[in-house]
Image (cartoon, rainbow, N blue to C red):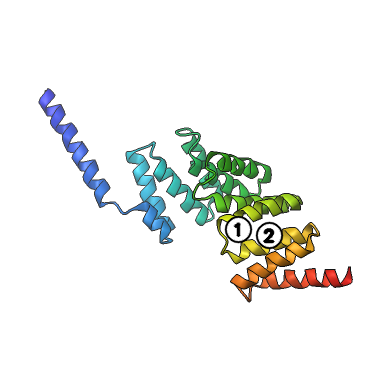
Amino acid sequence: MKSNLLWIFLVLIISVSAFGQDMPDALKLYQNGDYKEAITICETELQIRPGNMDSYSVLGWSLIRLGKYSEALEKAREALKVSRYDARIVEIVGEANFYLGKNLEALKWFEEYAALSPGGGRIDSVYYFMGELFIRMGEYNHADIAFTTAVYHSPNIARWWARLGYAREMAKDYDYSIEAYNKALELAPSFPDAKRGKERVEAQRRNG
């Protein structure tokens, strides 16, 4: 009887192992933009290994890219019950709340991510999102700090420089606003937000 149970156990282990080896890599699928397939793989992996935080992470990222923010939030909350301080999941909660328009809730989770993982792979995006949240709330000096930190980590994203220029424009810090808009235009000479922003600020300085 014991030998039969051992044999069944070994067969199950071999079967699961073989199945896992045949499965596509969910992270690669996500990186290639195949979000629906990545979700399918992650859901299958979580049936086999319910506490797999890597699968929860890729699942959350993929759901967000597909605009399924409520579902991403639901899955992220489920993941937090397994590992409360996994920075990847904390960021997903923040991002889902951001897109759902829950500004203060999103800000809380982004700030937690920055505390948990100040050198993390999403730190640049987290500060960008924080900048957008501060703009929504009319806190332009805080937005300046957040966007400045975002472009420090990723200095080659024209949109982020343009948003920094806008935050400074709204704070009436016109000289530094022009500086940020110029940087955006160096990276993308025809970027419309930066062009219009620079024109507004130059007109304001002429008329002021």
Residue beneath the point at 41% across and 51% down: 39
Helix, strand or loop at mark 2: helix
On screen, residue 192 versus residue 121, left or right, reads right
Quarter of the image where one finds residue 206: bottom right
- Residues at circles 2 and 1 in contact by the CB criterion of under 8 Å: yes
Identify residue type, mark 2: Leu
Q: Which residue is mark 2?
A: 164
Quadrant in which the C terminus is drawn: bottom right
Identify residue type, mark 1: Val
Tag 1 or tag 2, which sits nearer the N-term? 1
User: Which numbered disc covers residue 151?
Assistant: 1
On screen, residue 70 versus residue 16, left or right, reads right
Above or below 142: residue 199: below
Helix, strand or loop at mark 1: helix
Residue beneath the point at 38% across and 47% down: 42
| Residue in the foreground of this view, choosing between 108 and 38 | 108
Quarter of the image where one finds residue 168: bottom right
How many numbered circles does the render carry? 2
Residue beneath the point at 13% across and 32% down: 7
Q: Is residue 193 visible?
A: no
x and y percentages locating residue 83 in the rendered image: 46, 34
x and y percentages locating residue 85 in the rendered image: 50, 35
x and y percentages locating residue 198 in the rendered image: 74, 70
